[in-house]
Each structure stands twice: as C-alpha cells, then as structure tokens.
C-alpha cells in the first residue's frame, strides 16, 4: 500500500520544476491547496506556531534542504529528527521507509508534517529528480501518508509516525 502512495505522490509531483532560485514550484493539481484568505507565507527561518501548512512550508523545505545538502541520501528518520529539532511536534511527523522490504534504497522518500487539516509533504530521491514539496489535505483517518504511520508502524520498521 505504501508503494501505491509513494507512486501516486511521485506522479503528482512529476510536473514540478525548479525555479531559478532552486525552489520547487509545484504545478496546480489535486494535491495543492490554496491558502485561506489572510494567510501569510512563512519564513524559512522558523516555524509558525499553530500556523497553516502554507505558513510553514518555507521552514519545512529549508530544514529538509539543509539536511540533504549535508547528506543527499539522508533517511526519513534523519530528516524527521531535524524537523523535530527545528520545532515541529513529533506527533505531527511521518515518513516513508528508507529501505524496501528487499533491503534496497527506494527511488524516493517521503516526509510529512500535519498542520491542522493540511499537510506539507516533502519528497526526495533519484526517481523524482531531487527535492520537491506540496501541500495536501490530511487523510480522513488522520495523518498525511498512506501506510506511513498508524497502529503498529514504528520508525524501526523503516517508516512510520514518530508519535507512535
């Protein structure tokens, strides 16, 4: 099921292109959500406490890109640890497996942070041409990644919710 979610997200991000300043600009799709009226774009320097996904996307991206600049093959667990250190609640973070069931490195890794009813989802790897992020609605059952968390799924199994 995780493979379907990863594949689906990879397809959704396939239309992303890098702008002149190396920031991913997603194309309009079912994954993007327009910020509500009055919402402001956040700063890459810090997270906005009780802010929206749109207000926190810049800090989310800057934190992940900082980790990837030091280690392009960073695991989801390493990236979520950096997001937590930067101020995000452990319970809001999820990540996909950093190894497949056959112990291979996947084509891409997903990390998400939930902000109310929305999520910022970051994805990186060779299969997606670097780092990209998008804003998406949270799942009906909670969380952001299908198969990336929930009962019994822990970071030791390769992917999961840090709050489990």
Image: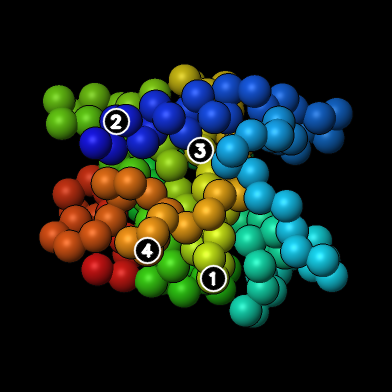
Measured as percent of width and height from the top left, residue 136 is found at: 56, 49
Q: In this rendering, is residue 12 above or below 61?
A: above
Q: For the point 63% across and 61% down, which residue is it? A: 53
Q: Which residue is mark 4?
A: 142
Task: Name the residue nearer the viewer: 102 or 153.
Answer: 153
**Cβ atoms under marks 3 and 1 closer than 8 Å:** no
In terms of sequence position, does the residue under pointer 3 or pointer 1 come before the other?
1
Marks 1, 2: nearer the viewer: 1
In terms of sequence position, does the residue under pointer 1 or pointer 2 come before the other?
2
Marks 3, 1: nearer the viewer: 1
In terms of sequence position, does the residue under pointer 4 or pointer 1 come before the other?
1
Measured as percent of width and height from the top left, residue 61 is found at: 64, 50
Q: Which residue is mark 2?
A: 3
Secondary structure of the residue carrying numbered label 3: strand
Q: Which mark is residue 123?
A: 3
Distance in Å between CA atoms under marks 4 and 1: 10 Å
Q: Dot 3 surroundings within 10 Å: few (below 14), some, or many (20 or more)? A: many
**Cβ atoms under marks 4 and 2 closer than 8 Å:** no
Distance in Å between CA atoms under marks 2 and 3: 14 Å
Task: Name the residue nearer the viewer: 30 or 6.
Answer: 30
In terms of sequence position, does the residue under pointer 2 or pointer 3 come before the other?
2
Q: For the point 74% across and 28% down, which residue is it? A: 18
Measured as percent of width and height from the top left, residue 152 is found at: 14, 60
Secondary structure of the residue carrying numbered label 4: loop
Q: In this rendering, is residue 39 above or below 69?
A: below
Q: Which quadrant of the view contains residue 40?
A: bottom right
Q: Which mark is residue 116?
A: 1
Distance in Å between CA atoms under marks 3 and 1: 20 Å
Distance in Å between CA atoms under marks 3 and 4: 20 Å
């Amino acid at each position: 099921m995780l493979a379907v979610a990863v594949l689906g997200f990879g397809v959704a991000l396939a239309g992303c292109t890098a702008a002149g300043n190396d920031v991913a600009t997603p194309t309009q799709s079912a994954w993007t959500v327009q910020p509500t009226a009055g919402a402001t774009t956040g700063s890459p320097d810090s997270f906005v406490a009780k802010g929206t996904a749109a207000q926190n996307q810049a800090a989310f991206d800057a934190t992940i890109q900082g980790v990837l600049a030091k280690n392009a093959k960073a695991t989801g667990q390493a990236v979520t640890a950096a997001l937590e250190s930067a101020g995000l609640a452990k319970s809001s973070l999820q990540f996909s497996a950093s190894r497949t069931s056959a112990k291979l490195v996947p084509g891409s890794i997903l990390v998400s942070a939930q902000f109310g009813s929305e999520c910022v989802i970051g994805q990186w790897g060779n299969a997606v041409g670097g780092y990209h992020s998008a804003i998406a609605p949270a799942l009906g059952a909670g969380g952001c990644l299908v198969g990336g968390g929930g009962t019994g799924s822990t970071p030791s199994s390769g992917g999961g919710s840090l709050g489990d």
